[in-house]
Image (cartoon, grey):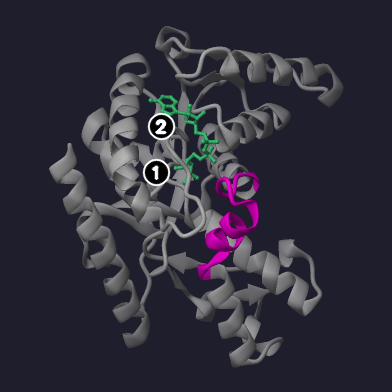
């Protein structure tokens, strides 16, 4: 069995971080592709030159040519513009639909058997765009949002409670935006319900900080949006696919009747393996959770309508 081949589309902040983490974790050889000339080549060379120090055997290369991406096992799409202070993820729609549509067609042509992970925003609409333009079975396309949102939630909670981040588990449903639905009922610390450790009011404050987690970073950076945690989250999903680990993670997955929704991608718990999304795990929701989920799905549906008009 040879090494996996991973393509990262976009050599910007998120793309370069994805490539660096994937190489450092020895997930496979990495091709980074961007429209900028020299940038992917330079970053790719730099990352490859880090491999002896890291002690990993991966070849990282940068390119502007899709021929170099041919036959990839996994493709991670990070191309597109990032938001600046005052912008919502939805403000990126018109520009990023154009970019992600173009990229998805080329990815599908050169890597017809790949699994695709989409990171570009607005996430749920970009995953849908990739599905429409690639022609792939929808279960081979997944969106990275829930792993990041729960990572933020887990970080804040772990610090508050004074435990390892590893022992905090959380779940979030819905779209990757202000309507996301963190399910505190399913949040456990070392197997013990989180409410054993923290008051409902404080928990709600942490939920609010999580909802605004992306904006908090945009407001600090001023020139762009988060990339280390988004990249690490995409690479965790990539690992589960490439190593067929069957991790159960919150991802933007295609719903075909699950959660009573059909025909669009929304954040739900799913099992990720070699085939992509191998199963969407359904769960009982309370009346309030169901309402919040439906509201979030409605927000995704209206964005997807705009995508349909732009494509
Ligand atoms: N093909 C390939 N790369 C492209 C294309 C294209 N058609 N169009 C733009 N790009 C590249 C840009 O040249 C740039 O290098 O995408 C890269 C984007 O990098 P950054 O501007 O640094 O943005 P980044 O922070 O990486 O965010 C990228 O991920 O998290 C999301 O909201 C974020 O949509 C944004 C995306």
User: For numbered disc 2, what is the local secondary structure?
Assistant: strand
Main secondary structure found in the magenta portion: helix
Q: Residues within 10 Å of mark 2 (few under 14, many from 20)?
A: many
Mark 2 touches mark 1? (CB < 8 Å) = yes
Marks 2/1: CA–CA distance: 8 Å
In reply to whether residue 304 is colored magenta, the answer given is no
Of the 4 image quadrants, the one containing the N terminus is: top right
In the image, residue 146 above or below residue 173 = above
Pick the residue in front: 61 or 244: 61
Residue 311: x %, y % from top left: 17, 36
In the image, is 119 to the left or to the right of 47? left
Task: Residue under label 2, please give it.
Answer: 115
Q: Earlier in the sequence, mark 2 or mark 1?
A: 2
Instruction: Give the number of the disc on residue 142.
Output: 1
Residue 78: x %, y % from top left: 47, 35
Instruction: Give the number of the disc on residue 27.
Output: none
Residue 64: x %, y % from top left: 47, 12
Q: Which residues are magenta?
A: 211-228
């Amino acid at each position: 069995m040879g090494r996996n081949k991973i393509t990262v589309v976009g050599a910007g902040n998120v793309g370069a971080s994805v490539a660096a983490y994937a190489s450092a974790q020895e997930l496979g050889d990495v091709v980074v592709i961007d429209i900028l000339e020299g940038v992917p080549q330079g970053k790719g060379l730099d990352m490859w030159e880090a491999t002896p120090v890291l002690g990993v055997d991966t070849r990282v290369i940068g390119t502007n040519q899709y021929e170099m991406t041919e036959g990839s096992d996994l493709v991670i799409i990070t191309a597109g513009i990032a938001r600046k202070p005052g912008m919502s993820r939805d403000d990126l729609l018109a520009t990023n639909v154009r970019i992600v549509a173009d990229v998805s067609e080329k990815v599908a042509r050169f890597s017809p058997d790949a699994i695709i992970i989409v990171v570009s925003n607005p996430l749920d609409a970009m995953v849908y765009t990739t599905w429409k333009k690639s022609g792939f079975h929808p279960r081979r396309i997944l969106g990275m949002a829930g792993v990041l949102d729960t990572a933020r939630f887990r970080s804040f909670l772990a610090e508050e409670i004074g435990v390892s981040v590893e022992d905090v588990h959380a779940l979030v449903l819905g779209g990757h935006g202000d309507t996301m639905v963190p399910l505190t009922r399913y949040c456990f610390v070392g197997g013990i319900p989180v409410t054993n450790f923290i008051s409902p009011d404080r928990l709600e404050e942490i939920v609010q900080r999580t909802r605004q987690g992306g904006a908090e970073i945009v407001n600090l950076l001023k020139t762009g949006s988060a990339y280390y945690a988004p990249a690490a989250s995409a690479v965790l999903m990539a690992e589960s696919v490439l190593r067929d680990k069957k991790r159960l993670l919150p991802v933007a997955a295609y719903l075909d009747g699950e959660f009573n929704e059909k025909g669009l991608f929304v954040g739900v718990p799913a099992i990720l393996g070699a085939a992509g999304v191998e199963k969407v795990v359904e769960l009982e929701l309370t009346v309030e959770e169901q309402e919040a989920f439906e509201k979030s799905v409605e927000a995704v549906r209206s964005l997807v309508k705009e995508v349909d008009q732009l494509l």
